[in-house]
Image (cartoon, rainbow, N blue to C red):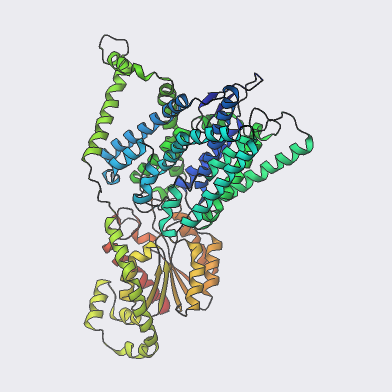
Amino acid sequence: MRRSDLHGTSIEIERKNVGERRYITGFDGLRVMALLGVIFYHLMPFTVPGGYLGVPIFFAVSGYLITDIFIQEWDRTGKIKLGSFYIRRLRRLYPTLVMVLVTSTAYMTLFAQNLLSHIRNIIWTNLVFVYNWWLVNNGQSYFDRYNGESPFTHLWYLSVLAQYYFIWPLILIVLLKIFGERRVQASGILFSLSIISSMLMTILYHPDTVNRVYYGSDTRVAPFLIGAALAFIWPSTRLKKALNARTNLIANILGGILILVMGITFFTMPGTTATPYYGGIFIFSILAVLMIAIIAHPSFMWNRLLTNPVFKWLGSRSYGIYMYQLPVMIFYEQKVTNIAAHPVLNTLAPLVIILVISELSYRYIEIPLAKFDYRQTFALLKKIFDLKSNLQWRRYLAIPAVLVVLIALFGAVTSPEKVVQKTDGLQTKLAKNSKEADKKNKEALEKQKETSAAKTKQKKAKLTKQEKEIAKKYQLTDQEMKFAAVTPLTGVGDSVLEDTGADLQEIFPTAYMSSKVGRQVDEAPGIIAELKRQKTLSDNVLINLGANGPISDKDVKAVEDAVGSKRHIFWVNVHVPTKTWEGSVNKTLDKATKQYKNLTVIDWFTPSKNQPGWFYGDYVHPNPDGSKQYATIVAKKIIKTLNK
């Protein structure tokens, strides 16, 4: 039997007692589903927030295929050839990994030095397949898209997979020796271990330390173990070719349901919530393994349904596509800063680049080096640089290849451990504002109590020296400053509001600000309800949400319902030129103003559109100059609207 492993490597297995060969082509289709989930999560993380669940599918397929291969070898020969297996794995994994590390480091050395932080640690931990554990203590969250995302973060998966490849065969030999033909009991042991792994994920999970459970080999092993458990009781070479019509019908319908549910989960289970870690990933893994069982059975139709030339092409190149995807996306986003102007084009362009690079890698790196006799390395190099040899075209390729390696080495050796990021000033500012938020909000609530009595006096009183300085700073008239001083305001927003909130509270001293990095619009109704319960929600509500992902009419309605029609909502539109959803968010808000009389959109997008000097390096968060402009625009619109 010839069959592809997780990344399309063909492996020969003779069927015990029967000389048939069988290629389970449907696994290519399942692999493509997983790959698309991961890619579109990286491209459109808030449209496909559960796309990261493609990884448990990869783990499950690997667990099943590797275990099935070893069990067949054990049954046929009574032993497992570990040495040859390890060599095949290294031949398969290493060339592309080295290519990604070297070319990406060379590119960053020349064009993106700000991404070179920790590059030496990143390289060596990847080369020895422990990068995931380095990320646990040193990396950012896999779900943090606005904090200098590394082009290597996705390689955590390869380290985990390699650890399973090198440890699992040893454990499997022990299981086969202990249980022999009692395969059901061995399967039960593995499934029990997968439950323990899932429980460990639940116990260790905390929103502030999600790296530990997301990158940890022990907490991510459940899908691999469930796939391995299936191999013990569902060996691909011993499944009956023909089952009765009723069984086929039930299995085929179940397969359709599984594909549908898994697809829906890609859109409904974000990794930023607790659900995945409280059993969500475990349940999804069970669904994936059930689908593997249905595809593997020759009597069911799903192997045929998931077989076509496109899936075969993508499946065989899935390893390269996965490896090159994130560097291409991040480098593309750094150079093309007006992605929102052409969202479709700027979604398709990186996809095309990834596919082209992956095809070239597959043809000229992965396949040749998987078969290459490395004992001939020095002989080949000698031949390439021998001017009398007939390998001139290879010589011409060797020169730029050596140059790329030298550039990468230079960048890795000379780069400081922590490179200053374009957004480092932003992080300092956010940390400062977050630290001072509770104190300022407490002071604002105290001032709100005095507001009613102060309104009449404030209209007649002259501005204090401090108020005059604030008015001048934000280009406000005396009357505007007087009005703002007694206008209650409650802000609910994301990191943009956390960035600018201190400026707004200078203008509106009674303003209460609730902001959080990464906050999504669907969190707003619950926050507003809690503010109502605490009686801290004022008559004027400022919403600054939409920078972290698209919003829908339904989202706007949920916020409207939570606030209520008696309060006025001021919603700031977004400036996120590096993301595809910018135009969609702003159109949704403009449309909502026609439906809700108490909703006013504050236009931040138009005045900031051609003002790069207002922003930090991410082009989203206002720098100190931009914060002043933001606060002025917001304040003037609020004051003008309330004075009508």
Instruction: Decide: is 630 above or below 111.
Output: below
Judge left or right: residue 268 versus residue 547.
right
Question: At 71% from the left edge and 39% from the top edge, which residue is drawn?
Answer: 252
Front position in the image: 402 or 40: 402
Q: Point out the image quarter for the C terminus.
A: bottom left
Front position in the image: 24 or 17: 17
Question: At 72% from the left edge and 28% from the top edge, which residue is drawn?
Answer: 241
- Quarter assignment of residue 451: bottom left
Front position in the image: 151 or 372: 372
x and y, in percent, of residue 334 in the image: 34, 45
Front position in the image: 634 or 545: 545
x and y, in percent, of residue 125 in the image: 34, 40
- Quarter assignment of residue 157: top left
* In the image, farthest residue toward the front: 178
Question: At 34% from the left edge and 36% from the top edge, which residue is drawn?
Answer: 101
Picture mark count: 0
x and y, in percent, of residue 578 in the image: 38, 50
Judge left or right: residue 635 versus residue 529.
left
Q: Is residue 551 visible?
A: yes
Q: Is residue 632 visible?
A: no
Q: Point out the image quarter for the N terminus.
A: top right
x and y, in percent, of residue 188 in the image: 61, 43
Question: At 32% from the left edge and 38% from the top edge, which residue is drawn?
Answer: 124
* In the image, farthest residue toward the top: 388
